[in-house]
Amino acid sequence: MVMRQELVARRGKSRIRLWSVLLPLMLIPWLRSTTKNVQVEASPYGGPADALFPDPQGDAQAQKVESDDAFLDHLSRAAFAYFWEQADPGTGLVRDRAHTDGGSVGVASIAATGFGLTALCVGAQRGWVTVDQARERVRVTLRFFAGRAFQQHGWFYHWMDSSTGARQWNSEVSSIDTALLLAGILTARQYFAGDAEIVKLATSIYNRVDFRWMLNGDPMLLSHGWTPEHGFIRYRWSSYCELMILYVLAIGSPTYAIPAASWYAWKRPTITYAGYTYITDGPLFIHQYSQAWVDFRGRRDKTGTDYFANSVAATRAHRAFCLSLARKFPASYSDTIWGITASDSAKGYLAWGGPPMDRQIDGTVVPCAPGGSLMFTPDICIPALRAMRVKFGSRVYGRYGFVDAFNPTTGWTDTDVIGIDLGITLLSAENERTGSIWKWFMANPEPVHALELVALKLHQ
C-alpha cells in the first residue's frame, strides 16, 4: 500500500504478473510523497472525534495488569476510531491509509469501506457511537454505491477519490475488493434490518453484481477484474487465498449465481511445517479475510477441509516460523512477539510472510498478523499484541492502535496505519469476544444458501 503493490500482494505471491496489466501503479510512491496531508477535524457525525475515544496510551503499568478483554476493547475502540474519522461525510468512502497522528491521504479503498461498514455495526453495538449516528453513516455509504459510484455490471473500482468516487491510480474494477465491500454491506443490512431504506439499498447493490460476467467465459473461475483500457485481467482466482468470500457471494447470488462446482475448481496447495499440515498459498492474511464474516467453524466440505481449523493450524505454524527466525533477528521475534504478513516495510509495501522462508524478511513485525488471527488462536495472539504494546509503547501504538509495521532490529517504525489491516484486527477481535460479525453476516440467507449448495456441512 505504500507502493500500492498491495494491489498485487493481496492476491498472493503467485499473482505478481498483475504488474504487467497495472503498470501505472508504479507511480504510487511518488504520488504518496507528494499528496497533501488532511488534518483531522471535528467529526461530521456528531461532536469532536477526540471526545469519542480514549487516550491511546494510558498508564503503562495499567496496561500490564488490565484484563485481556479490556486490552481488546481498547485496541478495538482505537481501530474503530479510524473508520469513524477517515470516512468522507458525503460518500462514506473510507480512506485506504492514514498517518498515525490522524493525518490522511484522500484516496479511498472499497475494501476498507467494507471493513468500515462492519465496524459501524460494532461501534453502534458497543455504544462507541449512537445507533442513529451509525445508521446515518451506513445510509450515506449505501446511497453512494447504489446511485453515484461508477459500476461495471455491478462491480466497483478498487481505488476511488474519497470525496467524489472518481477512479484513482488507473485501478481495476476489482472482484475481490467488491466482495469485501459486499460483505460489509450485507453485515449492515442485517444489523439494521429494521431500516427499510438500508435493506433496500443493500439488497439492490448485491443483486446488481453480475458474477457470471466476471467469469469471462470460464465455466467456474472468476477473473481478478476488468479495466476499460485492457478489458478483463487474464488471471483468475484459481488457488486458495482470500477468495472464499468472493465465491460464497457468487454461488449464493439470487440474481447472477455461478455454479456451486466453482467452489471445488480452485486449487488447495498443502504444506507441512512444525508438525502442522494445512492448505496455504500466501501470507497469513489470506486465512483471515473471508473468515472475518463467513462462519466456517465446525464445517467441512467435500474435500474434507475444515477451513476454520485450517486457519488455526496456519496461525500456529506461522508463530513457529517466526520463532525460527529469532536466532537471526533476536531483537524482533520471540515466543511472545511475532507476526509477518503483507504490510508496509522500510522498502515499501511487501507481500511477505511464511512459511516457507521469504528472503525479503528483515526483522519487521506486523501487528495485524496476530491481530487478524485473534478469532482463531487467542491464546497466542493476545499475548503477542499485549507484549508489543507494553515493550514498545507509543513508538508502535497511537491514535488508531498499532502502526502497520515496525522493525525492532533496525529501529524503523512505520508512520502509517492501513485501513484493511486495522479492519481485520477489529473484526477478528469482535468475533473472538462475541462472535457478532459471524452472527450478523450469517443471518443473511444468501451465504447460508451458498454453504448448503457446496455441501459445507457441520461435523461437530
Image (tube, helix red, strand yellow):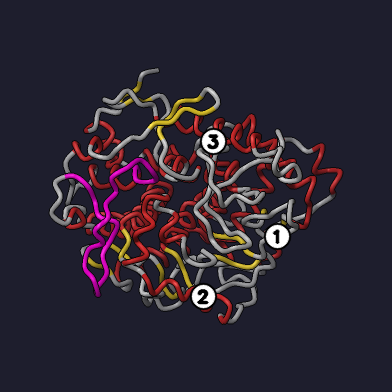
Q: For the residues marked 3 and 1, what is the alpha-carbon distance in whole angstroms? A: 26 Å
- How crowded pointer 2 is (Cα within 10 Å; few <14, some 14-19, many 20+) is rated as many
Secondary structure, mark 1, is loop
Secondary structure, mark 2, is loop
Q: Is residue 239 magenta?
A: yes
Q: For the residues marked 1 and 2, what is the alpha-carbon distance in whole angstroms? A: 22 Å
Which residue position is annotated with label 3? 375
Q: Residue at x 34, y 46 (%)?
A: 243
Three-letter residue code for mark 1: Thr
Q: Give the dominant element type of the magenta stretch: helix, strand or loop.
A: loop
Which residue position is annotated with label 2? 106
Q: Which residues are magenta?
A: 220-244
Three-letter residue code for mark 3: Met
Secondary structure, mark 3, is loop
Q: Earlier in the sequence, mark 3 or mark 1?
A: 3
Three-letter residue code for mark 2: Gly
